[in-house]
Amino acid sequence: MNYWLIIIPLISSLLGWAGMKLGTWFLIHRAIPKRQAELAKAAGVAVGAEFSLSTIEEKIKDPSNVKKIMPLVETHIDDFLRNKLKQKMPMIGMLIGDKTINSLKEVFMKEIEELFPAVLSQFSGNLKNEIDIPKMVAGKIAAITPHQLNRALSPVSRYFEGVAALIGFLIGLVNLAIFLSIR
């Protein structure tokens, strides 16, 4: 057997790899930048259709999530009544003790528990008016440089280059088998 015949699968593998390498380079550095504005707008519309702020609004207003926030709020109110109030208004600080602080904290916590859902609802409603998801996504995608795209897609393109090299090698083996069978 001639050992030079093994070159056929190796050359096929190299051609498969080089073809994929050239294709990904062309795609990243030529095709995508020319159509980046269109792609960005289409991606923004697609993301906007799949992702809505209503879902976030529901999560924000969910009573169980409000209850998760309350210990943090209570800690801040306690710190305010025990420390900051006394610093800002020393006369009041001298007149209130632990019992009054605990009573005030209890009243504030009940009021905040009733107030939070309305405040969070208003906040999320304002977010819905201020945030345009399709426009935001389109802007971010339009700002991606070819270098950033190349870095992001590098692991994927290496995978496809390896697959193309393997397929090229297999095609080379098939060609070698055909060559040897007709010889």
Image (spheres, rainbow, N blue to C red):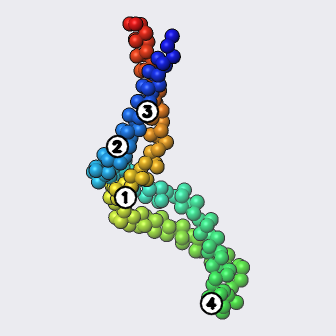
Amino acid tagged 4: Met
Within 10 Å of the Cα at label 3, are there few (<14), some (14-19), or many (20+) other Cα atoms?
Answer: many
Amino acid tagged 3: Trp
Within 10 Å of the Cα at label 1, are there few (<14), some (14-19), or many (20+) other Cα atoms?
Answer: few
Residue hosting label 1: 143
Is label 1 or label 2 in front? 2
- Mark 4 or mark 3, which has the lower sequence index? 3
Is label 1 or label 4 in front? 1
Q: Position of residue 12 (x, y in %)?
A: 42, 25
Residue hosting label 2: 26
What quarter of the picture does the C terminus occupy?
A: top left
Residue hosting label 3: 17
Question: In the rendered image of this protein, does residue 90 appear above or below residue 176?
Answer: below
Secondary element at tag 3: helix
Amino acid tagged 1: Ala
Left or right: residue 125 versus residue 84 is left
Left or right: residue 117 versus residue 34 is right
Q: Nearer the viewer, residue 36 or 84?
A: 36
Amino acid tagged 2: Phe
